[in-house]
Amino acid sequence: MAIFVTIIVALYWWDWESYIEDHFIGSPKEFAVDFSMLVTLVFLFVHHDDPLGLAFNFLFLGVLDLVWVGVHIAEHPGQTLRLRKRWIAQKLMGIGIYLVGLLAVTYLLDLFPPYVAGLTIIFYASLVRKLCFGELRSRSTVEFSPAKTSDWEAVLQINSHYVTSNHGSEFLLHDLAGFEFDGNADSNQGRFYVARIASNIVAFAWVKDSLNPELLEEIRWFSPTEKKRFLEGRPLYIEQVAVDPAYTGRGIGRSFYDWLIKMHTGTMPCAFVAVEPRCNSGSLAFHSSMGFDRAGEFNSAEFHGIANYRSLFVCIHR
Ligand SMILES: CC(C)(COP(=O)(O)OP(=O)(O)OC[C@H]1O[C@@H](n2cnc3c(N)ncnc32)[C@H](O)[C@@H]1OP(=O)(O)O)[C@@H](O)C(=O)NCCC(=O)NCCS
């Protein structure tokens, strides 16, 4: 059991190093929970040859995991409701498994030698590790980079999902199916970036350093100041951004924008969001949550085959 307990402690350490350390704020609450977890992990060693003590210890660790997630969510408000719910649900499930495990251990200790209870603890603690830590791992391992030719197929798939999607509040107008991606070689074409988790592409962004002058002419600015500020700045025009539908609501769009903005320091991020005849309300909510202001609008009798089209032009002034 001592080896098993050492592995559990090492895994907690690994999680801290790999997924948490960079996001750690160091507030008193977060410190208090982290310190309590450290003490609880030390007690795992103390109880390593006492199955009942160990089972209680794991239950307490499960409760602390839940408290840790609660504090972390409160201190890092940039996470979506869906992510919060899923993460909390995983931790509640962990507590449930630990509780059932504790009851099983109490029962088994009456009937069998202690090693049976020990093996049961190994089984259910491994189950908790497998089922209840996925959210922490998946949200923290997104990597961003310029797109390569080999990424194009995945980019097309994500794009095509939103171009053809007739349901939901989010969609894309520009079908990239016929687009000849040249590996970001031609700067007139703009640049494509991808986000990946492990080797899977989970999002892409298409950005340009300027706006088509004809389109720029057509913008009706909400105030002369908006126009002036825009013309004086250096735009980072986001032509398209899309997250694989299986991965939306996990903060990937937000981290992608944060990364793009960091990559293009000194620029003014801007984008169009369609509002009529169909409103991309998801994108509107996303951009406003990212701090984009409504600077103007674009109206067209016919745009990309859509009649009476209207979109909002949104920017971050910095
Ligand atoms: C819009 C899109 C890029 C957002 O990506 P995402 O990874 O789901 O967004 P995040 O999880 O990072 O959310 C960041 C913030 O935006 C908000 N947001 C994102 N999508 C939202 C939605 N559909 N409704 C309400 N708010 C939303 C989140 O609540 C979150 O706010 P918070 O941080 O204050 O809690 C993604 O949903 C998408 O690919 N949509 C389809 C393509 C599209 O419409 N692109 C925009 C074209 S202009």
Image (tube, helix red, strand yellow):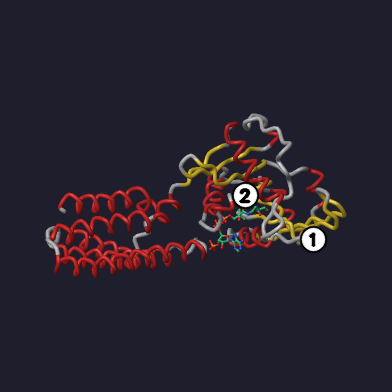
10 Å neighbourhood of mark 2: few (<14), some, or many (≥20)?
many
> How far is disc 2 from disc 1 in space, using C-alphas?
21 Å
Residue at the image point whose x is 62% and y is 39% from the top: 192
Which residue position holds label 1? 277
The answer to which quarter of the image holds residue 187 is: top right
Q: Amino acid at mark 1?
A: Pro
Which quadrant of the figure has residue 96? bottom left
In this rendering, the count of numbered labels is 2
Q: Nearer the viewer, residue 87 or 27?
A: 87
Question: Furthest residue to the right?
Answer: 301
Quadrant holding ligand 1?
bottom right
Element carrying mark 2: strand
Residue 171 coordinates in the image, percent (x, y)? 69, 54
Does the rendering let one see residue 247? Answer: yes
Describe residue 263's horizontal placement relative to residue 56 as left or right. Answer: right
Relative horizontal placement of residue 252, taking residue 63 as reference (left or right)? right
* Residue on which disc 2 sits: 242
Q: Is mark 2 within 8 Å of ligand 1?
A: yes
Q: Is residue 147 above or below residue 4?
A: above
| Secondary structure beneath label 1 | loop
Amino acid type of the residue tagged 2 in the rendering: Ala
